[in-house]
Image (cartoon, rainbow, N blue to C red):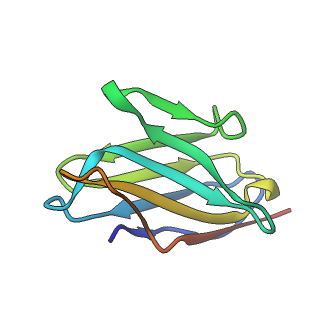
Amino acid sequence: QPVESGGGLVQAGGSLRLSCAASERVFSINGAAWYRQLPGKEREFVAVFASGGNIRYSDSVKGRFTISRDRVKNTVYLQMDNLTPEDTAVYYCRRVRIGSGELFWGQGTQVTVSS
């Protein structure tokens, strides 16, 4: 199971970095993604390592968030800069199981941005 960490409380304009660790024997580093669920809303896409090494971001975070990965640690990161209260959400990591391609979600980590 992927494990997220790094959430917390930050003031508007601040930064946080989320981490998503997973067993290298089970989960691929490719296809890793971040999603978030805002209060009262459905889970929404944030960023992904798409096929061919391409990176995609949602329009709402483009230019402020950066997804990266450490292949040695099999860990995916989400650097979040210039945070706003509208970024307050539970952030989820999604990883792909090697072989089956089945998607697995982490337990989520709360990010709260105060104004």
Total label count? 0
Rendering coords of residue 20 (x, y %) = 39, 61
The answer to whether residue 13 is left or right of residue 93 is: right
**From the viewer's perspective, is residue 104 above or below residue 3?**
above
Q: Quadrant of residue 5?
A: bottom left
Rendering coords of residue 69 (x, y %) = 33, 45
The answer to whether residue 115 is left or right of residue 112 is: right
Rendering coords of residue 94 (x, y %) = 43, 56
Q: Quadrant of the C terminus?
A: bottom right
Q: Quadrant of the N terminus?
A: bottom left
Rendering coords of residue 59 (x, y %) = 69, 33
The answer to whether residue 78 is left or right of residue 11 is: left
Front one among 41 and 4: 41
Q: Residue at x 58, y 62 (%)?
A: 91
Q: Residue at x 40, y 26 (%)?
A: 54
**From the viewer's perspective, is residue 47 above or below residue 96?**
above
